[in-house]
Amino acid sequence: MFKKFLIAALLVSSMAVRLFADEVSEETYKNQLYYRHNKLELTTKTRVIGESRSYSSTGISSSTYSFEAFAQTYGNIETSSLQRSEQKEVTDWFIYKGGVEEISDLEFLELIGDKARYKDVKEKMATRGGWRLLGNATIGVGIVAMLGGAAFSAGQSVITGGGVVTALGFFISAFNLEPHHYIKSGYALNKIDEYNLALKKKLNLPINFE
């Protein structure tokens, strides 16, 4: 009787251990998936840009010779041209979440919890956005002035002034376009390593798990 009881107890214990192992295995697998879907990566991409430049110049010279009642003119035209083309490699870097979702500098800073840099970048973006809005408004005013001046036969000064205002608006907008990044790649790489390591520890995963 005792022997049967012992065998039954061992069977129950074995099943419990197996169920517990399966549960732990499932939890570990879910943690691994979560990490892979949320880890951060810095990726670089290189693209080739073709640039071409051309320059040409034309020189005209003439000479007139007079002898008593006769005169003769000699002329010379010289044209020179120079053309140059080259290819440049431009390397950009990007931050990805889970290997598929590209995130901006602002999203990255919010994710890693760098509140000071987040606030600084957000203020810079707002400032640039305000200048671009002003530039676009200036372009609109300039175009209206040119079209209105031409339609109502206004003076040349009005049309010229409208052109100057439009050009000014383009310059304001162009100088305040968003840069590709507000943060340095080295800073981003260090913070990515810190974030991924903290995420592994939180999920009880090995440090070398990828």
Image: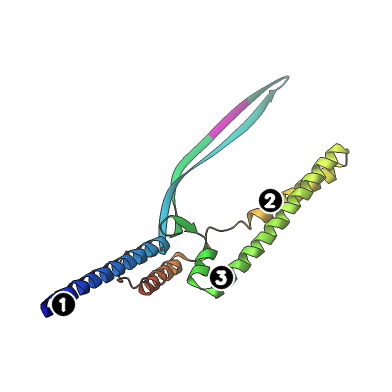
Name the spot of residue 95 as percent of width and height, x first.
45, 60
Marks 3 and 2, the one that precedes in the sequence: 3
Foreground: 206 or 66? 206
Q: Which residue is mark 1?
A: 5
Mark in front: 3 vs 2 = 3
Residue at the (56%, 32%) spot, across then down = 79
Lower position in the chain sequence, tag 2 or tag 1: 1
Q: Is residue 30 found inside the magenta-colored segment of the image?
A: no
Provide the residue designation for mark 3.
Answer: 118
Q: Which residue is mark 2?
A: 170
Q: How many angstroms separate mark 2 from mark 1 (CA)?
A: 90 Å
Secondary structure at badge 3 equals helix
Name the image quarter holding residue 39.
Answer: bottom left
Give the percent coordinates (x, y) of residue 134. 73, 57
Tell me if residue 113 can be seen: yes
The residues colored magenta run 75-80
Callout 2 amino acid: Phe
Type of the residue with mark 3? Tyr
The crowd level at tag 2 (other Cα within 10 Å; few <14, some 14-19, many 20+) is: some
The residue furthest bottom is 2
